[in-house]
Image (spheres, rainbow, N blue to C red):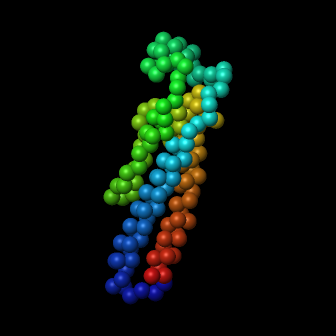
Amino acid sequence: MSLPISELKPFVNGLFVDIREVLFETATNIKVRMSEPGKPITYPVQWDSEKQRRAFFATNGFGKGIPYTRNGGYERSYAVARLPQGASLHAPHPAGAIGGTASGWQSRIHRGRWNHLLTVLFQELAKIPDAISNKFTARSRE
């Protein structure tokens, strides 16, 4: 790449736009993967605690009925937004129990049946350096 110094600022600004797009695409890929439906429940249920099991039955399935029937709410709960410096990915409670948290915890009830957030994060974030490198290469050939 050999550009006059006067073209450095537009090049860097364009690269910044490219990097924000890579981050948005990464967040979108994570959203798509985390929104995949999980496998059916397995019995016996692997409760996290006896307290959780009792609460489930005492509250009629945490207010969702017994037996619980999926309505697709978890799969629709993930949202991606563009930010000035990149992107944001969010899912409200109880998404952490179903798909897991960034710290790695996932409820035993959902473990092995739903995509695990920490695993998906590592797999998708590992793609960022190559994606940025590809954007840099393409921009430097312009």
- In the rendered image, which quarter is residue 87 located in? bottom left
Nearer-the-camera pick, 114 or 96: 114
Between residue 79 and residue 52, name the one nearer to us: 79
Q: Left or right: where does residue 93 sit relative to residue 111?
A: left
State the image coordinates of residue 80 (x, y, percent, origin top left).
41, 49
The quadrant of the rendering that contains the C terminus is bottom left
Residue 37 found in image quarter: top right
Could you say where residue 102 lies in the image, as x and y percent from the top left? Answer: 50, 42
Above or below: residue 77 compared with residue 88: above
The answer, for residue 1, to whether it is visible in the render is yes
Query: Who's the residue at 66% across and 22% down the image?
Result: 43
How many numbered callouts?
A: 0
- In the depicted view, which residue is nearer to us: 11 or 99? 99
- Point 39% across, 77% down: residue: 11
| The quadrant where residue 47 appears | top right
**What x and y, as percent, mark residue 78?**
44, 43
Which residue is found at the position 62% from the left and 22% from the top? 45
Q: At 45% across and 34% down in the image, what residue appears?
A: 73
Please give left or right for residue 25 compared with residue 84 in the image.
right
Residue in the foreground of this view, choosing between 71 and 11: 71
Furthest-right residue in this view: 43
Is any part of residue 116 visible from this angle? no
Q: Position of residue 77 (x, y in %)?
A: 43, 39
